Image: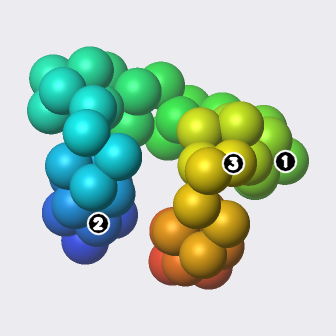
Amino acid sequence: MKIILKIFKKVANYTTLKKNKALLRMKRILSYTKLQIECIFKTLFTKNQLTSKLVFLVLM
C-alpha cells in the first residue's frame, strides 16, 4: 500500500497534478476492480504510455 502511494505521488508530480487531488484519486482507485483501474490509468496517462504501463504493472 505505501509503495503504491509513493509511486502514485511520483507519477502525480510527474504529470503535474496537485498532491491532494492525486491522493484522493488514489483512495478512489483502491476501491475499484482491476479492470476499472486499467481503464482509469489508460485515461489518466494517455499522454505518457510508458508511465501508465509502469504504474499498472506495479499495481498488479
From the viewer's perspective, is residue 58 above or below residue 14? below
Question: Looking at the figure, which quarter contains the N terminus?
Answer: bottom left
Q: Which comes before the other along the chain, label 1 or label 3?
A: 1
Is 11 situated left or right of 35 in this image? Answer: left
What crowding class fits label 1: few (fewer than 14 Cα within 10 Å), some (14-19), or many (20 or more)? few
Identify which amino acid the numbered label 1 is placed on.
Leu
- Give the number of the disc on residue 35: 1
- Give the number of the disc on residue 51: none
Image position, residue 53 (x, y; %): 65, 73
Image position, residue 45 (x, y; %): 59, 49
Which-is-in-front pick, marks 1 and 3? 3
The residue nearer to you, when weighing 1 against 10, is 10
Q: Which comes before the other along the chain, label 2 or label 3?
A: 2
Q: Which coloring applies here? A: rainbow
Give SS at disc 1.
helix
Residue shown at 84% from the left, 47% from the top: 35
What crowding class fits label 3: few (fewer than 14 Cα within 10 Å), some (14-19), or many (20 or more)? few
